[in-house]
Image: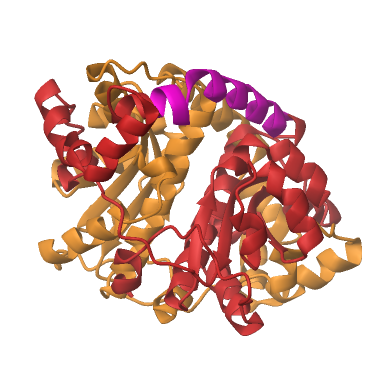
Chain colours: A red, B orange
Amino acid sequence: MLETILKHRTIRKYDKNKDVESEKLNKILEAAFRAPTTGNMQVYSIIVSKDIEMKNKLLPIHFNQQMIVEAPVILTFFADFNRFNKWCNLRNAKPGYNNYISFMTGAIDSLLAAQNACIAAEDLGLGTCYLGTTTYNADKLINLFNCPKDVVPITTLVIGYPLEIPDLTDRLPAEAIVHYETYKDYSEEDINRIYAEKEALPQTKELVIQNQLENLAQIFTNKRYTKKDNEFFSEKFMNIIKEQNF
Amino acid sequence: MLETILKHRTIRKYDKNKDVESEKLNKILEAAFRAPTTGNMQVYSIIVSKDIEMKNKLLPIHFNQQMIVEAPVILTFFADFNRFNKWCNLRNAKPGYNNYISFMTGAIDSLLAAQNACIAAEDLGLGTCYLGTTTYNADKLINLFNCPKDVVPITTLVIGYPLEIPDLTDRLPAEAIVHYETYKDYSEEDINRIYAEKEALPQTKELVIQNQLENLAQIFTNKRYTKKDNEFFSEKFMNIIKEQNF
């Protein structure tokens, strides 16, 4: 099991001709259902996209990443209080979940379920990829999927048979992530040491040259995750959360 | 592997006399590191609490749940842009991550890592429990752990050897959670069917009698997750996110 977790790779190239067997898909979904969930409320939903017309509509929403149409299965995970609220209303119980902490509860539920699905898929020999574009274009996903109020998309998992297995990606050393008892803030020396290996990788050096920038950090700030984009998507996503009643 | 996921239970009673071996703890942390992370930024941190004095201080923050002091290991997961911002600033790269979407990115990273840690722990024969109180008292956790700006606690995982293995908890049927291609909203009949099994459980009936309420839904709305509490914690957590620079 640990093996499956430790050999995780993000797969971006899928075998277009090999569907995910429905038995496997059902096992992946079953794994998602068993994830821990706040108060056993299960305040999340999953939408399965297999239809090519739907996937063609998903494609621009996810910034035209081709795996959307190449992979056989796309799972979108939602924070969902719609079902729970309907149940409460039918039971003479007054739901009080139109607020931010309930949105967070639904987001947490949906992410733990998503990671269970991810690990289950990999354990069954499939490849996966998370799509961060889900929060960027949450409004378009709500429209496309015809979601009611109290439902907000949180993440998307692409699933299919991998065409190629890339190398494991690098990770920062444990000391970068783990603190014991209290938060140990990072000195300049710490940061240099922690990022040294990542910065020295041949693929990092190549990326820096390709992007004509000084270093890897600038690729993040100037190209991949810019202040301007982040501010735009922050305001947009905040508005969606409110519009969806949270 | 799937076995580990499918037999997940929340453990609330731990063997006080049995520590988590450091080899196992390190494997759990290693599993967390391998979780998918947005753009491989790893914008999360983990604080390990083992010290009894720290756990005594954590106890009231987590609503005096005794497992805090009975379980040997408490892992708190944080959305963390502090390290990444420091790195950017030292590399002449201007970080643009003081915004809501970056908070969400950090929250997603931290939750996927937490679920990897949860599954790894269970696979190693340990029991786990998530604590939703983490977001409720995020301000107190920030103070206790001495967290800098750009760091927000998202969830907590209690880990130790179980004293008892409870039965699997019930889950709603698959049709409650999964939609195909588009969101299929729930009719009154759907809701009644979906919740029928849960409502008919002997432990549900017992709970309803104990609480002197009409039904399970009212236990959620009137006792466990009330509108008043949710609104209080929503405002509080929103303020913390902003105070921490997001």
Q: Viewed as shown, does residue A8 lie left or right of A156?
A: left
Q: Quadrant of residue B79?
A: top left
Is B67 situated above or below B2?
above
Q: Residue A170: percent from the left, percent from the top? A: 26, 50
Q: Viewed as shown, does residue B50 lie left or right of B172?
A: left
Q: Viewed as shown, does residue B153 lie left or right of B108?
A: left
Q: Quadrant of residue A38?
A: bottom right
User: In the depicted view, which residue is nearer to us: B112 or B89?
Assistant: B89
Q: Viewed as shown, does residue B176 lie left or right of B144?
A: right
Is A147 situated above or below A74?
above
Q: Residue B224: percent from the left, percent from the top? A: 59, 49
Outermost residue to the bottom: A23
Q: Residue at x 61, y 77 (%)?
A: A18
User: In the depicted view, which residue is nearer to us: B220 or A3?
Assistant: A3
Q: Residue at x 50, y 77 (%)?
A: B168
Q: Residue at x 40, y 32 (%)?
A: B138
Residue A11 visible within the image = yes
User: In the depicted view, which residue is nearer to us: A7 or A115?
Assistant: A7
User: In the depicted view, which residue is nearer to us: B195 or B203?
Assistant: B195
Q: Quadrant of the N terminus of chain B?
A: bottom left
Q: Residue A137: percent from the left, percent from the top? A: 67, 37
Q: Quadrant of residue A143?
A: top right
Q: Residue B171: percent from the left, percent from the top? A: 62, 71
Magenta: main secondary structure: helix
Residue B47 visible within the image = no
- Magenta span includes B177: no
Is B112 situated above or below B53?
below
- Magenta span includes A240: yes
Q: Residue at x 34, y 44 (%)?
A: B77
Q: Which residues are magenta?
A: A220-242
Is A185 situated above or below B171?
above
Count all numbered tags in the image, as a single digit.
0
